[in-house]
Amino acid sequence: MLRNDDLARLLLRLSVGILMLFHGVHKLLHGISHIQGMMQAHGLPGWLGYGVFVGEVVAPVMIILGFYARIGAALMAVNMMVAVALLGGLFPLQLTKTGGPVSEMALLYLFAALALFFSGPGRYSINRS
């Protein structure tokens, strides 16, 4: 049976990093006023919304390159924990009309980031940490 853990980690890094980077680039181009609004609606200062750029631009680039990918994964995981809290509040598994959790994508990114944090980036990375 063919087994290549390093290739699997590379595929996970690239898919999670590239797909999350699309979200970050969109926010760079179109702003984060909606994020700031959600923060303020939860009693938090709006300027905390700028943290989304760390979690959705800086962290994905670190993950894609495998440059301190564990730190990038931890940053993305924190970003996604905040997203789950903002989207679902006390009920993060509340269902949409189509049956998925309201925070489904954020949960998927959260667990993928945690998998990368615990597994490491693998051999095909800049510094393997």
Image (cartoon, rainbow, N blue to C red):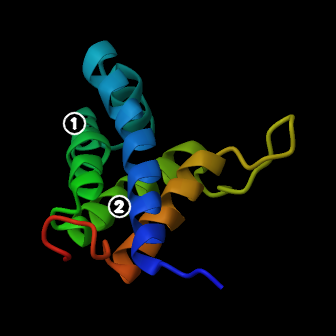
Q: Position of residue 74 (x, y in %)?
A: 30, 67
Residue for point 34% across, 56% down: 76
Residue placed under numbered mark 2 in the picture: 78
Residue for point 21% across, 46% down: 54
Q: Earlier in the sequence, mark 2 or mark 1?
A: 1
Q: Position of residue 92 (x, y in %)?
A: 65, 55
Q: Amino acid at mark 1?
A: Tyr
Characterize the local packing of mark 2: few (<14), some (14-19) or many (20 or more) Cα atoms within 10 angstroms.
Answer: some
Q: Residue furthest front?
A: 1
> Tag on residue 50?
1
Quadrant including the N terminus = bottom right
Looking at the picture, tell me which residue is in the foreground, 49 or 98. 98
Q: How many angstroms separate mark 2 from mark 1 (CA)?
A: 14 Å
Residue 32 visible from this viewpoint: no
Badge 1 element: helix
Q: Amino acid at mark 2?
A: Val
Looking at the picture, tell me which residue is in the foreground, 11 or 50. 11
Residue 11 visible from this viewpoint: yes
**Above or below — where is 72 with respect to 59?**
below
Q: Position of residue 58 (x, y in %)?
A: 20, 46
Side (left or right) of 111 relative to 29: right
Badge 2 element: helix
Residue for point 49% across, 61% down: 110
